[in-house]
Image: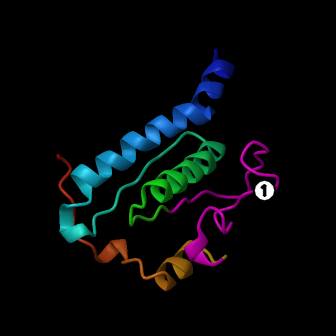
Amino acid sequence: MRGIMGWVKLHPYNIAQKVQVVVEHYRAKVEPLLNGRAKAMVVVGSRKEAVRWQLALRKYIADHGYPLEALVAFSGEVHDDESGPEPFSEHSPVLNPKLKGEGHPEGVRGADVPDPARGQQVPDRL
């Protein structure tokens, strides 16, 4: 049973449908909070799933012309032949192009992204 569920969780159609729901929910319910500076986090079950979600998020956002950015974080490298021939890391330009190959702390500061530690709290009930 675990093999079938792993296949379902990683299937591109399944991820694309979930990405659509997440992005549209964010745009409708979260983005208007804090004068458009609100953020959201999606947690997935594996590094391979994180790579596929990030690729799907970037595609969905670009296809719809939304002025949004997505950032992915995970440790090590991910080998996923279905997503690309080269191993992926959080420094991969295809996953996090605004980081310019740097780690998150340095790269995020250089990408004009506000420091979340200085942000306001978002209500936990929408």
Q: In this view, does 90 lie above or below 111?
A: above
Task: Estimate the x, y position of residue 114 in percent, counting from the top left.
Answer: 36, 78
Is 83 in the magenta? Answer: yes
Image label count: 1
Horizontal side, residue 103 vs residue 126: left or right = right
> Mostly what secondary structure, the magenta segment?
loop
Q: Mark 1 points at which residue?
A: 87
The image quadrant that residue 73 belongs to is bottom right
Q: What stretch is highlighted in magenta?
A: 71-100
Task: Estimate the x, y position of residue 72 in percent, counting from the top left.
Answer: 54, 59
Horizontal side, residue 111 vs residue 95: left or right = left
- Circle 1 Cα neighbour tier, 10 Å, few/some/many (<14 / 14–19 / ≥20): few
Q: Which residue is rendered at x = 19% and y = 62% of the image? A: 33
State the residue in front, 108 or 35. Answer: 35
Q: What amino acid type is highlighted by mark number 1?
A: Pro
Residue, far right: 85
Image quadrant where one finds the N terminus: top right
The image quadrant that residue 117 belongs to is bottom left
Q: Which residue is rendered at x = 74% and y = 56% of the image? A: 77
State the residue in front, 116 or 126. Answer: 126
Q: What element carries label 1?
A: loop
Q: In this view, does 89 lie above or below 113?
A: above
Task: Estimate the x, y position of residue 92 in percent, counting from the top left.
Answer: 68, 66
Horizontal side, residue 70 vs residue 28: left or right = right
Instruction: Tell me which colouring the rendered structure shows.
Output: rainbow
Is 46 in the magenta? Answer: no
State the residue in front, 59 or 71. Answer: 59
